[in-house]
Image (cartoon, rainbow, N blue to C red):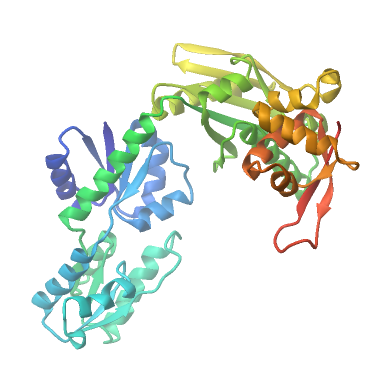
Amino acid sequence: MKIAFLGTRLLLDQEKALAQRYFDSLDIIPLYYDRYTDCVDILRERQHEFDGILFPGPFSINYTEKYLTPTCPWGYVTYDQDCVIGTLLQVACRFGTNVRMSVDSVSEDMIEPLFTVYNLPADDFKCIYVRENKMNDFDYFENTLNAHLNNYFSGAADVCVTGLSEVAIELAAKSIPHHRVLPTQRALLSSVSKLHTKITSIESKSNTAVIIIGINTEHSEDAGNDVCDELRRDYEAAAIAKSLAVRLDSDLIPCRNGTFMIYCDRDILISETDDFHTVFFSQLSLRQTLLNFSVGIGLGSTIKDANENARLAFSKASASRDSVAYVAFDATNIRGPLEIRPRNNADSASSASFASVLMNMGFGQENAHKMASIIEASSTKRFTIKELSNKSGISSRAVTRVVQSLEDAGYCTSVGMQVGVSAGRPARVLEFNV
């Protein structure tokens, strides 16, 4: 198992040596950076090489999540109570008592209770907390460093206590008294263990498939030139991708480059695609837009393999100017192009009972007959998702998934919004064609 450790050279080699001693089965690769903002470029190029990524703290992982979607499990090293109390004692030993500290990374909520727990004289440690909430912004490093410099040179603080190696390096270069907050051995090993457990848990689910969807909104024949048209096409693209995710009972992950990713159950995907022969999208969306679809489906024995295969298939689909899909089982076994088309509309199955239709859409026999009788007994055939869920006793999630398929197939349409019934977002009113 291959795990990347991100961080500055100042501490990373020590952390790698410690973790490697306790986890000898792991292949730990250090990825050095000068600033945590470098994580984005590093992982954009190399994330696919690893089974997991360990960040040095919440700052780097929060910043990176703003720009990249994980393709493998991520984790970060945490601070615990022993780390905080150890920091206070080391500061007292190095700089004496009655010391004034400019502190980042460790919050007031973590430090103040320890004075009571360990019976420490609170007057000996006066803390000025660097409060910068936007820790995923590019300027966080500069803001934190400047806050420490201001506290020190204004005479408000005698020593700067930081959890950022980058800040510690700058403070050392300016000969400013400082102390680097370090995770305890137990905290580091616990963080590695949690990441290892997360990777093992995911890899045991070999039934997972990965789908990458790209929808080209720039070359549609009905494309307008103003901002409103561009936003409309982007909204339509997201709605089309979401309709597929709902039918697959999975979540849609928007990626920064305009594509979408879906992690779904392989068996559901096989059923939905007729054993990888056709990819179905919303009939309504396909009829109203002329967007170009590129779909890559990846399968593998692990999430990592499925991700890599999905990228191979997506790359092949993207090379075509037509709406096509490919599925990759491995680098030498790529099937396609698969046809992309809408679901058959309701007219093609008008002779079938509505309960049978619901069973084909994913309901079990009992729920299908229960739902069919509720809808058929209504004079208006109009319901919200919540009403159908309450009347049938079926979960809203299950009802939503089946209703999405019914909409795609033309069995129901949205005819308005229900307002004024309760607080929150108005609910869609659906009319069923039964």
**Residue sitting at 30 percent across and 45 percent down?**
54
Dividing the picture into quadrants, the one containing residue 80 is bottom left
**Residue sitting at 84 percent across and 35 percent down?**
376
Of residue 162 and residue 239, the one placed in the foreground of this image is 239
Image position, residue 45 (x, y; %): 40, 36
**Residue sitting at 86 percent across and 21 percent down?**
350
**Residue sitting at 65 percent across and 41 percent down?**
394
Left or right, 429 with respect to 77, comes to right
Left or right, 396 with respect to 194, comes to right
Q: Is residue 288 visible?
A: yes
Residue 336 against residue 222 in the figure, above or below: above
Residue 427 against residue 125 in the figure, above or below: above
Image position, residue 206 (x, y; %): 41, 25
**In this view, which residue lies farthest toward the left?**
93
Image position, residue 221 (x, y; %): 80, 31
Number of marks drawn: 0
Dividing the picture into quadrants, the one containing residue 100 is bottom left
Residue 405 against residue 181 in the figure, above or below: above
Image position, residue 240 (x, y; %): 70, 35
- Locate the C terminus and report the quarter of the image it occupies: top right
Of residue 242 and residue 432, the one placed in the foreground of this image is 432
- Locate the N terminus and report the quarter of the image it occupies: top left
Left or right, 243 with respect to 270, comes to right
Q: Is residue 9 visible?
A: no
